[in-house]
Image (cartoon, coloured by chain):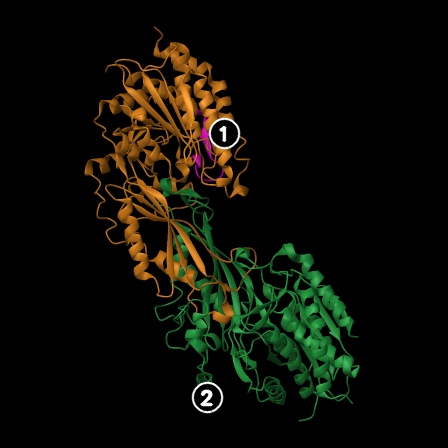
Chain colours: A green, B orange
Amino acid sequence: MPSLDDVLAKASKNSDAALTRLFELLKIPSISTDPAFQSQCKQAADWLVADLQSMGIEASRRDTPGHPMVVGHSDPVPGKPRLLFYGHYDVQPVDPLDLWHNDPFAPALEKVGNTQVIRARGAADDKGQLMTFVEACRAWHAVHGSLPCEICFLFEGEEESGSPSLIPFLTANAEELKSDLALVCDTGMWDQNTPAISTMLRGMVGEEVIITGPNKDLHSGMYGGPAQNPIRVLSKILASLHDDQGRVTLAGFYDEVPPLPDTIAVQWQQLGFDEKEFLGAVGLSEPAGEKDHSALEQIWSRPTCEFCGITGGYTGEGFKTVLPSQASCKISFRLVGQQDPDKIIASLHKHIEDNLPSDCTVEYKNHGGSPATVMPIDDPAFGKAHKALSEEWQADAVYAGCGGSIPVVGDFREYLGMDSLLIGFGLDDDQIHSPNEKYDLRSFQKGINSWIRVLDSLTTEA
Amino acid sequence: MPSLDDVLAKASKNSDAALTRLFELLKIPSISTDPAFQSQCKQAADWLVADLQSMGIEASRRDTPGHPMVVGHSDPVPGKPRLLFYGHYDVQPVDPLDLWHNDPFAPALEKVGNTQVIRARGAADDKGQLMTFVEACRAWHAVHGSLPCEICFLFEGEEESGSPSLIPFLTANAEELKSDLALVCDTGMWDQNTPAISTMLRGMVGEEVIITGPNKDLHSGMYGGPAQNPIRVLSKILASLHDDQGRVTLAGFYDEVPPLPDTIAVQWQQLGFDEKEFLGAVGLSEPAGEKDHSALEQIWSRPTCEFCGITGGYTGEGFKTVLPSQASCKISFRLVGQQDPDKIIASLHKHIEDNLPSDCTVEYKNHGGSPATVMPIDDPAFGKAHKALSEEWQADAVYAGCGGSIPVVGDFREYLGMDSLLIGFGLDDDQIHSPNEKYDLRSFQKGINSWIRVLDSLTTEA
């Protein structure tokens, strides 16, 4: 009977081939939010189907009204848990393209100081992470001829564009997908030497607000003064959404936000989070959120209202003396505790309509939402995974919060009744969603080892 | 000796040919603010040179570091005044293009109700207006074999993009250009039956404000809360530029704004300006400017601060959960009285910097400015032109204000020491700077007659 070390040795031997495979996947520009890249999303899905099939997994592309899902099943193993592994093959847009040092879809290994990094859009979010688990399974399969338990693979192609097809797919295929536990690889390490299991995730809801004033663009000489300017109206509304303490002013916004338990607050203080360094890395020095919370609390346990994009009037080269007819803003809220996305949006609508001059109208475009999630860390699976991770990295794994939302985790709980073990190997400087995204080669390689150890621990009696 | 009526009859006979010539000029997309249209601006200048030459005027294209000027000279006439006529051949951009019913550069005559209109970008602003004077001269020249006085023609190609070459050109060619009086055709009628001479013009200054927060775009999950969001910072600043009475809050903004003399206020009240109708035409109902001034006062005699364009973050299709690094706004101020563009911009800078969080930086791009102008209506030339206009239109001409800025008028006074007679035939519904710009055929034809009468009156003893 081969040992855990045999599987780890196999993964190490496969290392170059694993990187080649990841590069193939990274070359496919599967940008889900932009309809121009529809066929590339399908291409990424097909690549994954073929890759799963190459290790004996029964896999298929499952078309949806949006981008396809990929589903794979390994053989059942009596007496062992059934696990579902989730990742997403779609990526963020790449603009502003001129800030990239390289073609975002020409992956390359680069040396940055003493670190080797994989540079490409999707390297960290989420293709590189997804492939750590696939490669762990490949090594296990190569050594044992089978996987240690039944695994259902689920790869989504709409994670970066609001996952419109996810819930219909989960509910339509609930029996096929429902497992004892979900494994999700879309989160980060605590720092480059300390692994983490994310157990508190913020939710999110996105809404586009479009304000219309005059029924056409006007000349600012002829109408400047008496005509309502929608940029002015929108600015006043946006400016009214935070008070001078950094708190969101929407009615009821904090009603379902729990205070952070003292014990967790103490643990987090002991993590030695350096907010000067965290902010300094992006050219900032002071936390801009709620003044009575630390930066780490602001990210892990406090809700936000953020403006992701604004546009109105003439934005090209030069100057145009126009009073625009419309102005719009894409607003996102990060949610915690029991905050309900629908209630937050309703409160936003009321706030806007209460502050809208009678000569303006407002339209909304909803971009999806999901509540926050808190995981049961007293479940034995969490302890086993914690031990396995700590062994691979030779450092105590952290039970962490996560500022980003991973809506699928809430959906798994709501529609399939299963919890998720969130393990990932991203780092704060991976520049996900920004130009020059990267994934450390070490994250990729030790990520594969980590999953081998986690699979071993979850399928072995304690 | 031919009479005034002979010249008017000649213009009437030339009417179709005049329209054909105007259409040729309107077909040239001379958008000056967009560098992509540089050669088309040159083409429009060359067309005008050839047209002036065709009526025996010594004309040439005069290149500048920007778009060229066109200058023409007719023969001196002893004992008669020397006049300068100014117009501009450049036009505004045409976006949003999808709101045009026709190609903006395929001019067409359209019947709208009982009115014939010339539909094209530049039809009213300013190609159609400019050609009213050229056609008046052509008819005069055809009948008399010469013009009634020496006329210097000056056509600019950068009026819609801040006129960067104008002042250097005026100062370098002051002797050649300096005349007894400037005639400028870039304004409107009081209404479709009542001509106007504009004697109070607002000035303008344009400034682009670019706020930078983080040194790159960030993920709103990972940084949302502690990271400074430049859209939020910009919105707060823009929202602070007007108080709840519609007044601009910049320090010293109203220091050099004179109160409207009671006599003029009374005259304007008697004009019967229907603000409900004026605003209703563009889908609005209430004046949005200073609450203690009528809509007409807001346009003609009060300064403004307007937002002409705003952009920041992700503005494409779908949603991107990004915290942007930058956000920017193009701000314009309409100026009155003795307001100094430089002082206003200095006050804006101070206001922004006083309100800028320490983690943000600001950059500015200036887009030019000019102070307001008030004309001496007791000069006899104004009385003569007033009488000539009133005769052509069979209605008393109005001494009007003008909300739009015509910086050249201030420049003529400052650099060439001459006043300007501002006569134009535009109407409020011409949609200049908007999609579907038009110029009434009646404005074009009676505009030509008006200039013939004005030329006659200015060159005849009272």
Residue at label 1?
A: B43
Give coordinates of residue B427: x percent, y percent: 40, 32
Give coordinates of residue B266: x percent, y percent: 23, 36
Q: Is residue A55 visible?
A: yes
The quadrant the N terminus of chain B occupies is: top left
Which residue does the image show at 26% across and 21% down from the upper left? B384
Closer-to-camera residue (B356/B395): B356
Chain name for mark 2: A
Q: Write the start and end of the magenta stretch as one range.
A: B430-442
Give coordinates of residue A38: x percent, y percent: 67, 57
Q: Amino acid at mark 2?
A: Thr
Give coordinates of residue B337: x percent, y percent: 24, 41
> Is residue B222 shown above or below B118?
below
Mark 1 surroundings within 10 Å by alpha-carbon count, few (fewer than 14), some (14 through 19), many (20 or more): some
Residue B334: within the magenta?
A: no
Q: Amino acid at mark 1?
A: Gln
